[in-house]
Image (cartoon, rainbow, N blue to C red):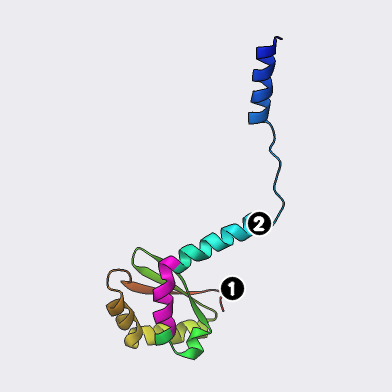
Amino acid sequence: MDERERRKFEQLKAWRGPRPRDFSVATTIASIVKFEKKRNRDLGDVITVWNALCPAKLTSACTVSSLANGTLNVSASSPGAGYELSRLLRASLERELTSRFPTRVRRIKVVISETCG
């Protein structure tokens, strides 16, 4: 094997060989920070208005989880909290949120989640 072929072989080994793994927590923390920045950018004002309009008892039991295609997904920590929230949404809360964000929020979906709260 001449010098040129040997360099090419070493280069291929470097490209295709096993890469060292990063076992530090920095990449995980960076991904969490990136996720939270995106969530705050997408939902920041909606969460602020949600916390202002929703009663304190339900604010501690329900969290805004996502906003996609005009549907605001809210996670409730228990079926009782989900029931109370759905009653409040039917009464006035959904109408108030859709009037404040007419282009972003068209409907609100309540999901029962054990990891909420």
Instruction: Work out whether 66 lies above or below 12.
Output: below
**Residue drawn at (70%, 9%) of the image:** 2
In which quadrant is the N terminus drawn? Answer: top right
Q: Is residue 23 left or right of residue 80?
A: right
Question: Crowding at label 2, few (<14), some or many (≥20) Cα neighbours within 10 Å?
Answer: few
Q: Nearer the viewer, residue 67 or 30?
A: 30
Q: Nearer the viewer, residue 25 or 84?
A: 25
Task: Pick whichever of labels 1 and 2 is earlier in the sequence.
Answer: 2
SS for callout 2: helix
SS for callout 1: loop
Q: Is residue 103 left or right of residue 71?
A: left
Query: Toward which corner of the image does residue 99 lie, by quadrant?
Result: bottom left
Query: Toward which corner of the image does residue 110 lie, by quadrant?
Result: bottom left
Residue 42 is a magenta residue: yes
**Residue drawn at (67%, 19%) of the image:** 7
**Residue drawn at (71%, 54%) of the image:** 24
Q: Amino acid at mark 1?
A: Thr
Q: For mark 2, what is the residue?
A: 26
Tell me the magenta residue range. Answer: 41-51
Which x, y percent locates residue 73?
43, 71
In which quadrant is the C terminus drawn? Answer: bottom right
**Residue drawn at (43%, 76%) of the image:** 47
Q: Is residue 93 left or right of residue 51?
A: left
Q: For mark 1, what is the residue?
A: 115
Q: Which residue is farthest front?
A: 3
Which x, y percent locates residue 22?
69, 48
